[in-house]
Image: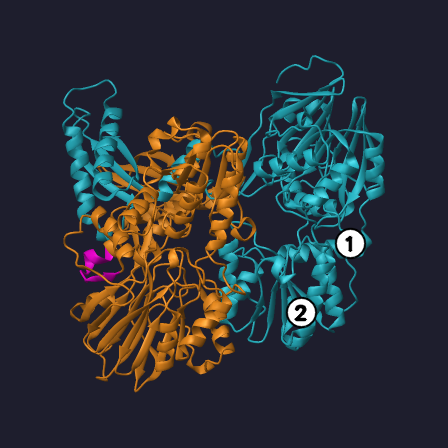
Chain colours: A cyan, B orange
Amino acid sequence: MEQIQNQDKLSIVALGGVNEIGKNMYVIQYNDDIVVIDCGSKFPDESLLGIDLIIPDISYLLENKDKVRGLVITHGHEDHIGGIPYIIKQLNMPIYATLLTLGLIEVKLKEHGILNTTTTHVIDSNSSLTFGAIQISFFRTNHSIPDCLGIVFDTPQGTIVHTGDFKFDLTPVNEQYADIHKMASIGEKGVLALLSESTNAERPGFTPSERLVGDHIEESFTKATGKIFLSTFASNVNRLQQVIVATEKTNRKIALLGRSMVNVVNIALKLGYLRMPPDMLIEAQDVNRYAPNELVILCTGSQGEPVAALSRLASGTHRQVEVSPGDTVILAATPIPGNERNVARIVDNLFARGVKVIYGSGAVTGMHVSGHASQDELKLMLTLMKPRYFIPIHGEYRMLYQHRILAESVGVDPDNIFIINNGEVVDFSNSEARKERHIPNGNTLVDGLGIGDVGHIVLRDRKVLAEDGILIFVLTLSNTDGKTVSSIDVISRGFVYVKESEGLLKELQQIALSSITQIKEAKTNQWSVYKQSIKDAVGKYLYAQIKRRPMILPIIIQV
Amino acid sequence: MEQIQNQDKLSIVALGGVNEIGKNMYVIQYNDDIVVIDCGSKFPDESLLGIDLIIPDISYLLENKDKVRGLVITHGHEDHIGGIPYIIKQLNMPIYATLLTLGLIEVKLKEHGILNTTTTHVIDSNSSLTFGAIQISFFRTNHSIPDCLGIVFDTPQGTIVHTGDFKFDLTPVNEQYADIHKMASIGEKGVLALLSESTNAERPGFTPSERLVGDHIEESFTKATGKIFLSTFASNVNRLQQVIVATEKTNRKIALLGRSMVNVVNIALKLGYLRMPPDMLIEAQDVNRYAPNELVILCTGSQGEPVAALSRLASGTHRQVEVSPGDTVILAATPIPGNERNVARIVDNLFARGVKVIYGSGAVTGMHVSGHASQDELKLMLTLMKPRYFIPIHGEYRMLYQHRILAESVGVDPDNIFIINNGEVVDFSNSEARKERHIPNGNTLVDGLGIGDVGHIVLRDRKVLAEDGILIFVLTLSNTDGKTVSSIDVISRGFVYVKESEGLLKELQQIALSSITQIKEAKTNQWSVYKQSIKDAVGKYLYAQIKRRPMILPIIIQV
């Protein structure tokens, strides 16, 4: 890392969350004080075979360990807290988060056995923190999980605002109003730089209020005659509250299916984020003691996750509960791109069981609204904050790009809008910004319990193996001259089914053998010549014959 | 196959196309005469690793080879013609198709070197064919490719109608009006059974006319100042015609990028389905001789296909043409579920090049309309045909299910609506239908040039290899007693990166060794005992230590 020359230097950098959805992590540094915002994870796309999770690369923080003052969390979604247990094991920073967010974080710390060794602090929108010359305060925002914060960093060079995820819900469930007056006052005092989320920057208009979903839930509950199943993101506590209200109005009981649903409801009840009449909650194993029209079953799996409750219900493999003809299943979620096929399969299975299914885009069913600000709300935030510099965050390039256009439309100077990559540093000197430095950054891949041990070579091999399998040639060389081949065995996995392809494998054995018997002269690196020769001859033959490219692995045994 | 008892037996069966999108193939049999409708392919989902294409299993047709009279094709889309070259090699039936459809089929036959050995017949909507007691006639429909047919089978037991893919476009491009009067007359005479497509059965309303897209294309061409790139399905010839019209109005030239675009435009021009002013078409290599505002570039890749023209243009790796700031790129297609991420990456790359991109759902941009009938059009078809029996086809279960509801709503007897699976036979006897027989059916997997040689075991192995790679243990046993281990070598691919994990591999070597040295007694199947012992010991250790399950492959060499 480059030495910081100027001793009044303010810097902003993303370690994750720009040019991608997920893995959010931002760093604010003022001279020798570093504050980290969020520590998210994201799921791998289909090219990262076998990888379970992606988290930010924190080399920069590790190199500057002694400057890191703390990790401040905006809210409790996975793309903001999912990396915490992995990162905290590498760098044990104190964590600052609201009560609910911390409740969700603590579940993770416990699972990883590091709850007792991690320092956590509860904050709320009225808290203030001081790290060296950085003063931190907060404002409350609306989103699809309660207790979300925007963060204000007052520094000697000026104020930096990070919105976190937000929308403007003017009729929020549970009266968790956004601090619009506070935002106005922050903007009034002057904002040097705004970092604002871009998830819905492509979407025109104003995102509807969560109340809309409540109305539709109530309407469908009133019409339903059998059991009601409703699946949504467990963390959408305000939606769960609306389900509770509709359940009460229709005199039903609620059972919970799925680990994350049970976890979140318990935390939210305990911490007072959910209010439920006594005796409404019943155990899943007691469901069959009630008549169908006395039941609401809240379940996980709205994104079609194959092992979650909804998928099991649809395929009839849930241990405790069954969907029956006449039941109603509500999917209160829009499938995230990539999940459509799995969700569609669930709907197919449910229809085949004679169930009424309310599914499809939230815009059509009214059973889902986004938690993110649409274009008019993004413009409202920009207008409230009136920033001198603007850095769109949380989004893929086209979203950041659309957000830039929105910022220009409300008067931000186009030269003062920076679309950054992860690792690109925006440095402020005398309140003037420049973008000319990089710090190390990237994806840290989690596979099982291994963190960062799966790299490009391993993934490239997995890709080849996935496409066409492996062909192994075991050569034994005689111990008299170390060159004469005593035997060649061919073993195949994931290539062709051996019993049906004995002829082909025999041919390949011959091709491998004759490719090396053509090598007459002894070479210093005899073995690698043999190996390459087999790879070339067999590879060429196979591609010409059947257009496949399995991994070809010659193994030589000297006997 | 069960013996047909009744000698006045009419049967309908799907070999592909129900409970799935793609791979359409239907069979109509009257006593000893079999007519096949369509022969499609479909793309594998992500679980079928390394598979290129799926085609129908035609065991039933092969068993009844001497009864098969011909293959009649409704239109030239891949899900209706993509299986032809593979299937024709197994069963050489005469093919009946319209001029354009046949042009597209012949490209495939040529690629597979079977053009000269295949019998083809050109038909049109006025043709009639006789196969034994089956009389076949046709009606013209609208769809996203010209020259589409619905098929009417008159049999002694009654009339069966197969719609093919269709919409009702009342203002079709090129005046290819649907034969609505003919449909009315068919319905008037009486339809025993209707097979109607269900792709858009979940979509309310009436699908807009293709003309709508033409209007939007013209508007955007008028506004554009730089080069215009437009990407759409090459087979949507009517849309290409509208591009030509807009190109003429804005005094530009057209260049073609992508093999299928070149193929289809050439065939459509030759056969008269496209009309283009002389000198409008220029070669791709001559693009740089023209000013940006003189150019329209029609390209493949609207679904984000990584090797297609649009993707190369977006990443700046196209050999002949470059996108530049100020250019306009129009994606005249809605991403098919599963393709969103690839399309989004292209849009990101184009924005990063300073290009104006018109993208997103066709409903928003107006640059795409569906080729399939929405609910009101499906009801119109049902109303025109007034079938006694109804079999919804072309669709996943929920689409077939929604189509059933539509049929009920226009008066079809619910007991006479059959949602079938591939292979389930609907038998008619005295014009009464029963569903109680199955014929063999399934997916035939194409991998490279291999057809049907990749089965469950190979795919299961590929899945394991893809997730966690392979660990190979090569054991050499001494030739004195055939039991003592002389050496164990550990080789890994796609598991961990060897250089960073030498310690782990050494441990595994020890575990493998000690697992077999514990086996004291000589067994008859000594080698398989050794192999199982290594698999168990290493597998257990790895899962406990790092939660991974690579394929473990012990190889024993007796020396």
Task: Describe the element under mark 2 as helix, strand or loop.
Answer: helix
Range covered by the magenta-colored residues: B86-97
Task: Check chain identity for marks 2 and 1: say if they share one.
Answer: yes
* Image coordinates for residue B551, horizontal then vertical, percent: 38, 44
**Residue bearing the label numbered 2:** A220
Name the spot of residue A199 as percent of width and height, x first. 63, 43
Mark 2 vs 1: CB contact within 8 A: no
Give the numbered dot on residue B527: none
Direction from residue A55 to residue B555 in the image, left or right: left
**Does the stretch in magenta take in B96?**
yes
Residue B533's x, y, as percent?
A: 37, 47
Given residues A331 and A406, the one toward you in this image is A406
Q: What residue appears at the point 65 percent right and 14 percent down from the top-left corner? A: A3
In terms of depth relative to the viewer, which is nearer, B360 or B559? Answer: B360
Q: Is residue A379 above or below residue A233?
A: above
- Taking the image as drawn, is residue B489 in sight? yes
> Mark 1 = which residue?
A172
Q: Identify the chain of the residue marked 1, using the numbered disc in the image.
A: A
Give the class, few, some or many, for how many residues have Cα within 10 Å of label 2's Cα (few <14, many ≥20). some
Horizontal and vertical percent position of residue A221: 68, 70
As helix, strand or loop, the secondary structure at mark 1 comes to: loop
Residue found 69% across the figure and 60% down from its top: A213
In the image, residue A129 sits, relative to residue A268, either above or below, namely above
Q: How many residues crowd mark 1 within 10 Å: few (<14), some (14–19), many (20+)?
A: some
Please state if A437 lies on the left or on the right of B77 as rendered. Answer: right
| Residue furthest out toward the top | A5
Give amino acid for label 1. Answer: Pro
